[in-house]
Amino acid sequence: MKLDIDNLSWQEYGYINESGKLRPKLNVKIIHGGRFVDVLGLLDSGGDCTIMNAEFAKGLGIDLEKCKEVDIGGIFGSEIKGHLAKVRISLQGFEEEFSIEVRFVEKMRTDIILGQSDIFENFLVVFDRKKRKFYLARK
Amino acid sequence: MKNNTDLTKILKKNHENKWVALSEDREKVVDYSETLTELQGKVGNKKVIYMKVLPSDVSFAF
């Protein structure tokens, strides 16, 4: 099968250099109700779903106590609890907003991890780490 | 707008494990705090990009 990538409109992004560690991050607007927050989000092709630091929930007006509790597994064995909520997001370079299910997690060391079930379901993603670039196209 | 991708120029040791508000072009740190709520209070209505800075001496498998 030939992948028809030439007819898609690709957006180019640079890997973010954080103290020598190169990470594929892009600007993401997270929207809930009339509120929004802009954040640098990490594309994680190995993550099953999208995870957000629970500190975002308060500013977005999301009451996590009213959200369904879910388990989230980590690669080092232990499971943690998260709360499931729907938000809308838009990605840098794309005007469109779309709805995703996010797992909000308390005491997360980072901010947002964009996983397979949301971003990779809706976009084609190409990583070219050697050139310090990555690319997204809407499916 | 061209966005800075080299955050080593602006993120320092004192930003690690903190919430940071970056300018829209990511060229400077507007402010930083222990919590996002506190930081959002400091920043007010300025247009910024938020991130939580990971420690530099640890590699992460997300």
Image (spheres, coloured by chain):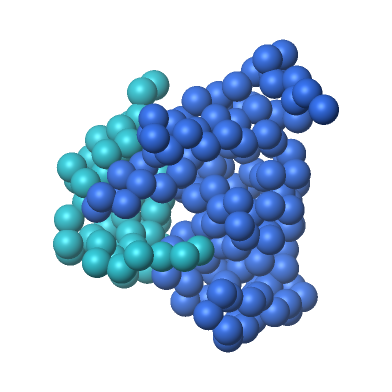
Chain colours: A blue, B cyan
Q: Is residue A87 left or right of residue A45?
A: right
Residue A33 visible in the picture: no
Q: Residue placed at 77% from the left, 75% from the top?
A: A68
Residue A79 rendering spot, x and y as whole percentages: 62, 83
A49 sits left or right of A113 in the view: right
At which x and y percent is residue A59? 53, 60
Q: Nearer the viewer, residue A129 or B14?
A: A129
Please name whichever residue, A46 or A32, is drawn nearer the observer in this view of the structure. A46
Specify the quadrant that holds the C terminus of chain A: top right
User: Measured along the vertical axis of the image, is residue A46 above or below residue A105?
Assistant: above
In this view, the residue farthest toward the front is A1
Query: Relative to B62, is A23 above or below?
Result: above
Residue drawn 62% across and 36% down?
A: A125
**Relative height, residue B51 to residue A9 (above, below):** below
Q: Residue at the location (50% across, 49% down)?
A: A41
> Seen in the image, is B54 located left or right of residue A137?
left
Give coordinates of residue B9: x percent, y percent: 18, 42
Q: Quadrant of residue A4?
A: top right
Residue A115 in view in this figure: yes
Of the 4 image quadrants, the one containing the N terminus of chain A is top right
Q: Position of residue B15 (x, y in %)?
A: 23, 60
Front residue of A32 and A106: A106
